[in-house]
Image: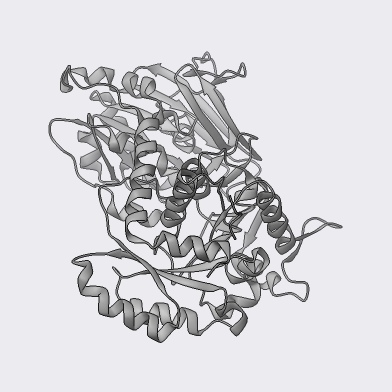
Amino acid sequence: MKPLHPIMFAGTGSDVGKSIVAAAFCRIFKQDGYQPAPFKAQNMALNSYATPEGLEIGRAQAVQAEAAGIPCHTDMNPLLLKPQSDHTSQVILNGKPIGNKDAYDYWRQHSSPKLGEVRRGLNEHIDYRKEVCEAFDRLAARYNPIVMEGAGSIAEINLKDRDLVNMSMARHAKADVILVGDIDRGGVFASVYGSIALQSPEDRKLIKGIIINKFRGDMRLFEEGRRMLEDICGVPVLGVIPYYNHIHIEEEDSVALAQKSFAMQQGKVNVAVVMLQHLSNYTDFDALEQDPRIHLFYTNNVDDIRQADIIILPGTKSTLHDLYELRRNGCAQAIIRAHRNGASVLGICGGYQLMGVEVCDPNHVEGDIDRLPGLGLLPVTTTMSGEKRTVQVECEYGKGYEIHMGETHPFGEAKASPLLHLSDGREDGYIVDNKCMGTYVHGILDNAAFVDCLLQPFAEKLSQTEASFDYAAFKETQYDKLADHVRQHVDMERIYQILRGDD
């Protein structure tokens, strides 16, 4: 089988569907007998994932690796920025945090004479460009083809000199670039044409095709538009992918939360995920969204919280700030009152920390607050620390992963009452009863056995015929459905010609 060039899905803007299209092609290439792997040089997201080696990457590349049928690795996303505020991000390089950066300083340093070089300590420097290129080279030596994803728009000419992820990465990889435009948001002609016109002659030659994404309506109505777009851009339109709502693929960007449900339903177990300002890893709840026994919704409305059957406090990138906000907006009291009235409460990661007696930050890891009282639902205390634990784990219910800063221990005279017993001999979390518990393990809700235990107190709401939900099998089906959907609407023969160098 002839090796294929790397392929990059670049975008006319953010949220045009690059991640999902890349996931689709990872599955298509796998189905066709290749050994693909995803790659995104630099990602910015709060949704992250732990690799088998216990390192951290963006969730989108973990999903794409799953679609490709391979374990995820830091080489697939060597540089990850996790926003901590409007101006600062934690920088994670090759899976390990190396510190926090102000956004202005980060980009200013990228435009220094030695591009991408950033001081790390007194005598050590990091050349980010060199790091991401080396990660790509290692990945390309093991897999073929590499399915690359750009970031945002490729036409941000003010950032071109500092680009690590779009056309500069395509040049290094010698990739064939497919430009993805979102017709649903409008202005697709201008955005596609402008994105190509603003490239240098060298980069323009790398753009081998266009995919129009999220089309609604009768495809025949766009035939003339397709020809016009090819004429003005001088680049073939390789596919027009219809908008879909029958396929579920985990989303990385928080934009996806806007499409989530924010209301309760009758006849199901209503699960309320508390909308924290710094909510992270919300893909923890994707399995519950698909479970036919459950209606999951996101809210910070105190009346909705009081009426929910199960309340989940999710992960957060800023535990103390969100704890302060929960007390200010009345959600803290609503959660406590709902639990007293029979609701179950589950905290995951930062949410587990919020449920304790107190959260302490004596070294000001998160900010200027030394200590705040927690919700007091669990007899534990948390002390924030600068060291991050990132590891995949197994327990009696199945698999998950930890990504957190801070240590949590029983408070005062309280005895340990762990929720989970991990295969490495550690104990995790705390449980008061089957209606009040917390854990550091992300992905615990992907395990049917744990979800069954969570739902057990509400068995009277469930039909005897409703079985446990197999989320792993569900995801595999969705990847195949996505691949079929995309394959049906793109010219795969032409794409293979381009990637073989026959075009």
Work out whether residue 150 can be spotted. Answer: no
Work out whether residue 184 can be spotted. Answer: yes
The residue drawn where x is 62% and y is 47% is 143
The residue drawn where x is 74% and y is 61% is 130
The front one of 302 and 146 is 146
Image coordinates of residue 211 in percent, x first then y, are 39, 67
Please say which color scheme the image uses: one colour
The residue drawn where x is 66% and y is 68% is 105
Image coordinates of residue 439 in percent, x first then y, are 47, 27
Q: Is residue 397 above or below residue 35?
A: above
Count of numbered circles on the image: 0
The front one of 243 and 159 is 243
Q: Is residue 361 above or below residue 254?
A: above
Outermost residue toward the right? 123
Q: Is residue 429 above or below residue 3?
A: above
Rendered image quadrant of residue 264: top left
Image coordinates of residue 249 in percent, x first then y, are 37, 46
Q: Is residue 397 above or below residue 194?
A: above
**Relative to 376, 291 lies left or right:** left
The residue drawn where x is 50% and y is 32% is 358
Image coordinates of residue 60 in percent, x first then y, are 48, 49
